[in-house]
Amino acid sequence: MPFESKYTKEAIIDAAFEIAEQEGFQAITARTVAKKIKGSVAPIYFNFENIDALIHAVVLKVFAISQDILSKQTGDSLYENMGRAGFEFAEKYPVFFRELVLKPNPYIASYEQTEAAMLKGLDQDLNTSKLSMDERKLLILKVKAMQIGFQTLIANNQIPSWITKKEVQELFIAFGHDLLNIELLKKE
């Protein structure tokens, strides 16, 4: 009779997610997950080929959460929505932000793949679609560098006391518009 686990694959992913959310992906081990589910390591290896496969499943869950945050943004501008979603992710999931953005890792697509997806999305944005491909690429790089700086401040709780997180987000959006307007002015 084949082994049946009382622990579902989803329950194991959720347990590993909770561990990584607090301590990072490196904290996901068979023992830490077994302890979290109050069981043995057997259900883990029954559902996953190895720990790397479980970590990959957790990373996919994090990406799905990130996409969900983006999809819930209600602004008219994809350009702004991407910025707001990045801030929300950094605030809600600071460990994942540091793990996925600030550390080298095999989980994030190369910059070129990420850039290609952003460029495709910005084709639909009324203002950014006025820019050439090279101008959009430069704009994305500038905004990404600025956004990572602001998100790092948020994820590390280093926002000065005289400004709120919401005001920092609005400052970022204003900077993003300034950069876009500069690129549009240069085009004229």
Image (tube, helix red, strand yellow):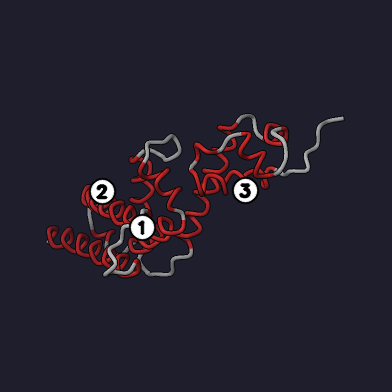
| Amino acid type, label 2 | Leu
Return the x and y of residue 58 as percentages of the image width and height: 56, 43
Mark 3 and 1 residues: CB-CB less than 8 Å, in contact? no
Establish if 134 lies above or below 158.
Answer: above
Q: CA distance from mark 3 to mark 1?
A: 26 Å
Where disc 1 sits, the SS reads loop
Residue at 13% of width from left, 62% of height from top?
A: 185
Residue at 31% of width from left, 56% of height from top?
A: 153
Query: Quarter of the image containing the N terminus?
Result: top right
The disc, 2 or 1, on the residue closer to the chain's N-terminal end is 2
| Amino acid type, label 1 | Asn
Q: Nearer the viewer, residue 20 or 85?
A: 20
Establish if 153 lies above or below 103.
Answer: below
Task: Please identify, in this view, whether the residue under mark 3 or under mark 2 is nearer the observer.
Answer: 3
The residue indicated by pointer 2 is: 141
> Callout 1: few (<14), some (14-19), or many (20+) C-alpha neighbours within 10 Å?
few
Q: Nearer the viewer, residue 128 or 41?
A: 41
Q: Is residue 44 left or right of residue 92?
A: right
Question: Based on the displayed image, in which of its 4 quarters is residue 184 positioned?
Answer: bottom left
Q: Is residue 57 left or right of residue 47?
A: left
Q: Is residue 166 left or right of residue 171?
A: right
Q: Nearer the viewer, residue 91 or 117?
A: 91
The residue indicated by pointer 3 is: 14
Residue at 63% of width from left, 34% of height from top?
A: 31
The residue indicated by pointer 1 is: 157
Mark 2 and 1 residues: CB-CB less than 8 Å, in contact? no
Establish if 68 lies above or below 106.
Answer: below
Where disc 3 sits, the SS reads helix
Where disc 2 sits, the SS reads helix
The disc, 3 or 1, on the residue closer to the chain's N-terminal end is 3
